[in-house]
Image (cartoon, rainbow, N blue to C red):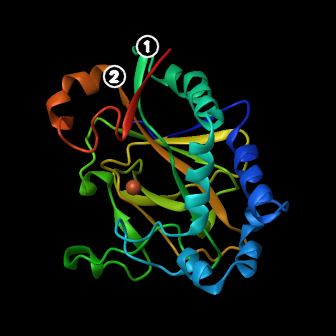
Amino acid sequence: MKTHIHRCDENPFIGFIAKIFEAKYNYTDELRNLQSLLEKIPESEKEKCVKIQTLGVNDRQCPFIADFHEAVDASDEFTKLYHTFIRKNILPLFPKETTLVVQKTPNIRFSFPNSAAIGKRKDPEHASSESDRIGFHCDADFGHHFSEMNFIIPMTPMYDSNSLYYEQIDDEQVEIYKNLKMLDPQSEFFQGYLNKLHHYNRINQTQHTRISFDIRIIPYSEYIEYLDAFRGTKFELGKYYVVLDS
Ligand SMILES: [Fe+2]
């Protein structure tokens, strides 16, 4: 399965995200310094952004996540940018497809210094492995279908512990965990099969906040092939996913 860093001409989402913070908080610094904004919001709200919670349970309570979704819902601006980006940059990666099934709205991740973008696993099977790996999982653990491909689009430079670590098989067929490094968010995005490749975060020990989108995409032909697996679940078309034609 392909794991690859692709190039793109531009990342239209960075401006969209910057506008949200400027409009709501008067924040005009670089997005990678967003941790400075945490000092200007109420302590209880800050805690929701930096306290490490439980993966998939309560680790998405940072108000900045809600700000993003509010901006997405406020007009069709974001959807237009999103669909244009996918048609231009991602659809060509599936040469046999004219149609993709795409996650309706990206997940936005914030990894602030001394915190992490996702919560820890608390289930007994995995909790013991969480000493320095935060949220170790593959997406199949959470009921995602194996036909999904993952894409990560950076809004800020992603490197070292502000980024994630993902499973790779090296030349000697040994399993290793590779740090996802994308230093130029205007021109890079990642494709990986995170449905089966494990991945995790660390405590962000860099000086910079990481903001990124992650999205899941299924080739339409595969979605149709496995239609029964999606029927009656939250992954039905119109709920989690939408169809995007060329
Ligand atoms: Fe994941």
Instruction: Name which quarter of the figure residue 8 lies in.
Output: top right
Q: Residues within 10 Å of mark 2 (few under 14, many from 20)?
A: some
Does residue 21 appear in this view? yes
Q: Residue at x 70, y 55 (%)?
A: 156
Q: Provide the residue designation for mark 2.
A: 220
Q: Provide the residue designation for mark 1.
A: 98
Callout 2, which amino acid? Tyr
Residue closest to the eye, 170 or 71:
71
SS class, disc 1: loop
Residue reaching furthest to the front: 74
Looking at the image, in which quadrant does ligand 1 appear?
Answer: bottom left
Q: Is residue 80 above or below residue 215?
A: above
Does residue 185 appear in this view? no
Q: Is residue 183 above or below residue 121?
A: above
Residue reaching furthest to the bottom: 43
Q: Residue at x 38, y 48 (%)?
A: 194
Q: Quadrant of the N terminus?
A: top left
Instruction: Name which quarter of the figure residue 87 lies in.
Output: top right
Instruction: Tell whether label 1 touches label 2 (CB within 8 Å).
Output: yes
Q: CA distance from mark 2 to mark 1?
A: 8 Å
